[in-house]
Amino acid sequence: MALVLAHLQEHASPLALSLLLVLFVIAVRLATLRSRAEKLLNKLPSPPSRLPIIGHLHLVGALPHVSLRNLARRHGPDVMLLRLGAVPTLVVSSPAAAKTVLRTHDHVFASRPHSAVGDILFYGNTNVAFAPYGDYWRRTRKIAAIHLLTTSKVHSFRPAREHEVRLVLARMRDAAAASTAVDLSEVLSNYSNDVVCQAVLGRLPREEGRNKLFRELFKTNSKLLSGFNLDDYFPSLARLDMVRRVVCAKAVKQKKRWDELLDDLIDKHAGQAVTEEEADFIDVLLSVQDEYNERQHQGNIDCTDGICLKLEQTQPTYRWTMPWPSWCGIPMQWPSCKTR
């Protein structure tokens, strides 16, 4: 060590030596902090059956929330540490612990974790759902609140909702006449898809038979975003360019399909003159494009954002609303009034 220092003093400038010293101090400090963090994590309760490389991934089944509940009952009623691949994951189970964590780290939970698939599908996570909390997110949310989701705008879509309800009832009446079974999950999913598509894109998708294509694209989006993604569990491995290209190939293909479809619809809307009452989400976004300096691809992402978010919110609501009255013994006339 002494020989190395002597050699450096002979051949290196004072500035270079100072820089090396600073880097050495920073490296030691980071190593110390990392060691302390590891010690704190190791004190938390954790399932003993941890495997090399994959950690506790094998303990998470097809229903993650059920698997985590069962693990928490055995190993940690409040907090529990899991190693999901290379990522240490803190599972908080009790309401009191969750309240403490959310209050202490509120700024962290205000943003979604980075997603490589979302980065591809949504132009670098620049939509309302995936954008990190900050000035850009607030500006995008302001556009949606002021121009797209006003009370008058929501009320203007009531005829479209009533029209779709009549179509659903007609299909169910035909199925009853033919004594065939009806899959309510599929019926309600198709209904919410068609209503949202009319609100976001107008009547063009239904007239051209594209509502089915939107339904297919949305389902593929959901599978890509909620499925197994390598970067969620092995972030360093997913950063390798070759691995990233292979893992994200389906997402790139899906994005191209969205771009082709939405570019065509936006071009058709750009050449139409509509009144304020007839304007759909695309018409509104085109009218404020210059005001907010939005680019063409931002219009695409706002459209997909509107479709995906509204479908994600409405479909589970419908699926839970239908069986709930029968569980509680409530006549079906009550939920029909509430739904309207």
Image: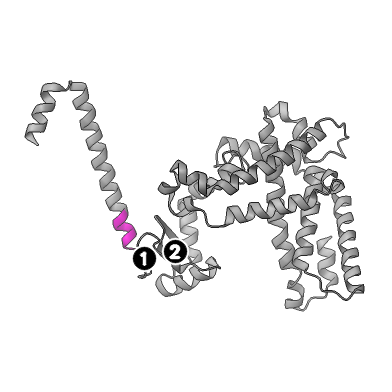
Place of residue 266 in the rendered image (x, y in percent of width and height, measured from the top left): 77, 35
Image disc number at residue 51? 1
Q: Please say whether residue 111 is visible from this viewpoint.
A: no
Residue at 85% x, 65% y is: 337
For mark 2, what is the residue?
57
Q: Is residue 103 above or below residue 134?
A: below
Q: Main secondary structure of the magenta part?
A: helix
Which image quadrant is residue 86 in? bottom left
Q: Position of residue 321 (x, y in %)?
A: 74, 67
274 with respect to 285 (left or right): right
Q: Is residue 18 left or right of residue 269?
A: left
Residue at the (79%, 43%) spot, across then down: 201
> Circle 1 sits in a helix, a strand or a loop, which is it?
loop
Q: Which residues are magenta?
A: 38-45
Q: Amino acid at mark 1?
A: Leu
Q: Is residue 186 above or below residue 206?
A: below
Q: Residue 198, image x and y in percent?
A: 82, 47
Helix, strand or loop at mark 2: helix
